[in-house]
Image (cartoon, rainbow, N blue to C red):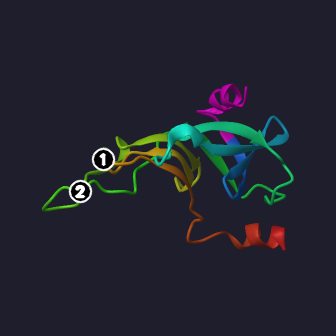
């Protein structure tokens, strides 16, 4: 059920309330929903992304939205395949090495969160839940939370 709910939200714009561990919170239809990204536990030493489940809203999230985001498919590998003489890869190759979703700021294009499976190395895939705060957060955002 949670995965079907999550998939129905892809491609739309939401308020973003932040991240706590492997959970993120967005505003949907006037309510806040927290999703937990779950690693595939039956995958042995590898670590594929498995699913999303609805999580407790009581985790530590901002009380007011910190951004307007678009939830979309995508992402980019941060891992490099060994290539002998060079470790340079084009952005296209890195994007093709990732299967997942991002929370993208609709105003700035900043990627707040990348989640899914990174296939950037040939040997093992890697479960990814990468939260990146922009280098400049508005003083207004900080003031509403103190």
Q: Residue at x 50, y 44 (%)?
A: 44
- Placement of 12 over or under 21, stated as above or below: above
| 15 or 107, nearer to the observer | 15
What secondary structure is found at the residue carrying circle 2?
Answer: loop
Asked whether residue 10 is drawn in magenta, I would say: yes
- Image position, residue 142 (x, y; %): 75, 71
Left or right: where 38 falls relative to 92: right
Q: Residue at x 72, y 43 (%)?
A: 35
Q: CA distance from mark 1 to mark 2?
A: 8 Å
Which of pointers 1 and 2 lies earlier in the amino acid sequence? 2
Labelled disc at residue 122? 1
Q: Quadrant of the N terminus?
A: top right
- Placement of 143 over or under 7, stated as above or below: below
- Image position, residue 95 (x, y; %): 37, 45
Q: How many marks?
A: 2
Residue range highlighted in magenta = 1-13
What secondary structure is found at the residue carrying circle 1?
Answer: loop
Left or right: where 117 falls relative to 40: left
Dot 2 crowding, Cα within 10 Å, few <14, some 14–19, many 20+: few
Q: Quadrant of the C terminus?
A: bottom right
Q: Residue at x 38, y 45 (%)?
A: 119
The secondary structure that dominates the magenta segment is: helix
Which residue is outermost to the left?
Answer: 85
Residue 136, image quadrant: bottom right
- Image position, residue 24 (x, y; %): 70, 50
| 99 or 47, nearer to the observer | 47
Is label 1 in contact with label 2 (beta carbons under 8 Å)?
Answer: yes
Q: Which residue is mark 2?
A: 82
Q: Residue at x 59, y 42 (%)?
A: 41
Q: Report if residue 16 is visible in the image.
A: yes
| 94 or 68, nearer to the observer | 94
Residue 31, image quadrant: top right
């Amino acid at each position: 059920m949670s995965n079907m709910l999550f998939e129905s939200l892809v491609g739309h714009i939401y308020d973003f309330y932040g991240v706590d561990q492997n959970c993120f919170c967005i505003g949907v239809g006037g309510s806040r929903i927290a999703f937990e990204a779950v690693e595939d536990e039956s995958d042995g030493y590898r670590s594929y992304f498995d699913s999303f489940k609805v999580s407790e809203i009581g985790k530590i999230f901002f009380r007011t939205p910190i951004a307007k985001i678009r939830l979309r498919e995508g992402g980019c590998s941060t891992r490099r395949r060994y290539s002998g003489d060079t470790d340079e890869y084009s952005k296209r190759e890195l994007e093709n090495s990732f299967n997942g979703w991002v929370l993208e700021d609709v105003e700035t294009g900043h990627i707040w969160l990348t989640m899914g499976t990174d296939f950037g190395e040939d040997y093992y895939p890697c479960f990814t839940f990468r939260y990146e705060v922009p280098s400049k957060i508005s003083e207004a955002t900080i003031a509403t939370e103190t």
